[in-house]
Image (spheres, rainbow, N blue to C red):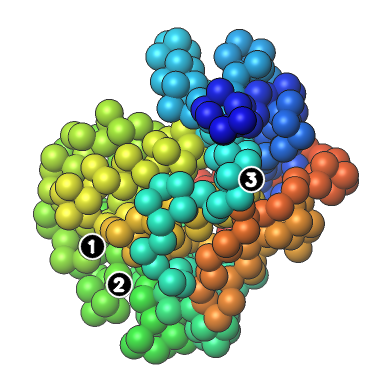
């Protein structure tokens, strides 16, 4: 009998289980999705500091939309969930993303192809990563210089950090001087050929942001990220116009619809969508294309676990306007590598692109997840002193 669409594997979803895994400064959330064809997949829905809300939303969405549907119905299920979950927002998006990534993992396993092959095929051979969370114990300029040198020696060609402590909208001159001294120390540590990325986490007023950007010009930063909060696109664009350094933003822009007015400013130089917060891989692909239409490169935000990293690697691999991948892997809890059979790990500051099927992580390992349950104190309060020591 010839194979027809009706006789191919449908991979109907039979069960969705959410896991919350305590990981030092945040809890990560995973959805383990099973099908009637015996194939299971995993997705990640980690969201800054509301893991239990996302896990509850995964359970709710599974019951409301997902059980009984084919894992191949990615576009239809996404549309169904997004429209009918009327208030949307990051919690719903992250729950959708956990399910959506797992569906891609299942589809890839059913077809025996990596996800990037299903989204247009590879356009990169190896993916440059940039290190984050490398500076947790460092406090003084000398300590930052040494820590930064160690990052460069691992092979990273870029690193990111927030030197501003718990600074608020309009820091005192001393706070600014101390931050500038830390940035200068990092430049001494890495030399002229490593790209330096500064993340202000939306701390400053536009006036303070422009003042600080100008004081940092001699250090030659690659980008200045969220110098002020990114909700007010006009205010952020005013900062972008007044500074010479590239403006990076996008990790808190959670939909392709909100992206329009952000890109219309023509002040965003690097867009940083988060594949979880936008609702998954397909939405990330669409957002990357919208950014490309404005000639803007993308660098997917990813401070989370191994499945989100694997999803980012798959999408990076097939995205022409990808520049570099944020990576916490080498500065994280070691058990992140136990949660799936094949967790991505940078080599020489780069991610190799897995050609295993699906997301390339193999099977999710629930016992390893259960060994590290929810941690109530896994939280990074960016406006309280010493937050970075939690890395
Ligand atoms: Mg950021």
In this rendering, position of residue 141 left or right of residue 254? right
Numbered badge on residue 109? 3
Label 1 or label 3, whichever comes before in sequence order: 3
Residue named by callout 2: 221
Q: Position of residue 52 (x, y in %)?
A: 69, 28
Residue named by callout 1: 246
**Quadrant in the rendering for residue 107:** top right
Numbered badge on residue 228? none
Given residues 199 and 184, the one toward you in this image is 199
Label 3 or label 2, whichever comes before in sequence order: 3
Residue 171 visible to the viewer: no
Residue 66 visible to the viewer: yes
Q: Residues within 10 Å of mark 1 (few under 14, many from 20)?
A: some
Q: Tell me if residue 285 comes above or below residue 184 in the rendering.
A: above
Q: Quadrant of the C terminus?
A: bottom right
Given residues 23 and 5, the one toward you in this image is 5
* In this rendering, the label closer to the viewer, 1 or 3: 3
Label 1 or label 2, whichever comes before in sequence order: 2
The residue at the point 27 percent across, 28 percent down is 257
Q: Residues within 10 Å of mark 3 (few under 14, many from 20)?
A: many
Circles 1 and 2 in contact, beta carbons < 8 Å: yes
Distance (Cα) linking label 3 and label 2: 41 Å
């Amino acid at each position: 009998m010839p194979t027809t669409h009706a006789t191919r594997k449908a991979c109907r979803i039979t069960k969705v289980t959410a896991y919350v895994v305590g990981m030092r400064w945040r809890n990560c959330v995973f959805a383990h999705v099973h099908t009637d064809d015996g194939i299971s997949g995993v997705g990640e829905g980690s969201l800054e500091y509301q893991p239990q809300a996302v896990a509850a939303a995964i359970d709710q969405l599974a019951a409301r939309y997902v059980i009984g549907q084919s894992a191949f119905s990615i576009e239809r299920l996404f549309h169904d969930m997004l429209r009918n979950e009327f208030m949307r927002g990051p919690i719903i998006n992250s729950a959708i993303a956990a399910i959506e990534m797992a569906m891609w993992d299942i589809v890839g396993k059913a077809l025996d192809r990596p996800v990037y092959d299903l989204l247009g095929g590879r356009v990169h051979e190896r993916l440059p990563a940039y290190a984050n969370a490398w500076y947790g114990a460092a406090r003084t300029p000398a300590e930052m210089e040494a820590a930064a040198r160690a990052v460069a020696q691992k092979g990273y060609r870029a690193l990111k950090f927030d030197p501003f402590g718990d600074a608020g909208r309009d820091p005192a001159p001393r706070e600014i001087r101390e931050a500038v001294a830390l940035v200068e120390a990092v430049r001494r540590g890495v030399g002229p050929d490593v790209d330096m990325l500064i993340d202000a986490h939306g701390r400053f007023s536009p006036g303070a942001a422009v003042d600080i950007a100008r004081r940092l010009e001699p250090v030659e930063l690659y980008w200045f990220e969220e110098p002020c909060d990114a909700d007010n696109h006009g205010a952020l664009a005013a900062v972008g116009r007044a500074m010479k350094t590239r403006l990076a933003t996008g990790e808190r822009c959670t939909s392709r619809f909100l992206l329009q007015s952000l890109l219309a400013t023509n002040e965003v130089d690097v867009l940083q969508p988060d594949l979880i917060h936008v609702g998954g891989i397909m939405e990330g692909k669409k957002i990357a294309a919208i950014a490309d239409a404005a000639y803007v490169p993308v660098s997917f935000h990813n401070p989370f676990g191994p499945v989100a990293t694997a999803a980012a690697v798959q999408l990076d691999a097939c995205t022409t306007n990808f520049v570099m991948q944020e990576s916490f892997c080498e500065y994280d809890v070691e058990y992140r590598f136990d949660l799936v059979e094949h967790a991505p790990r940078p080599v020489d500051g780069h991610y190799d692109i897995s050609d295993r099927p699906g997301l390339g992580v193999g099977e999710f390992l629930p016992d390893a997840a259960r060994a590290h349950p929810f941690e109530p104190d896994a939280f990074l309060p960016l406006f309280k002193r010493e937050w970075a020591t939690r890395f």
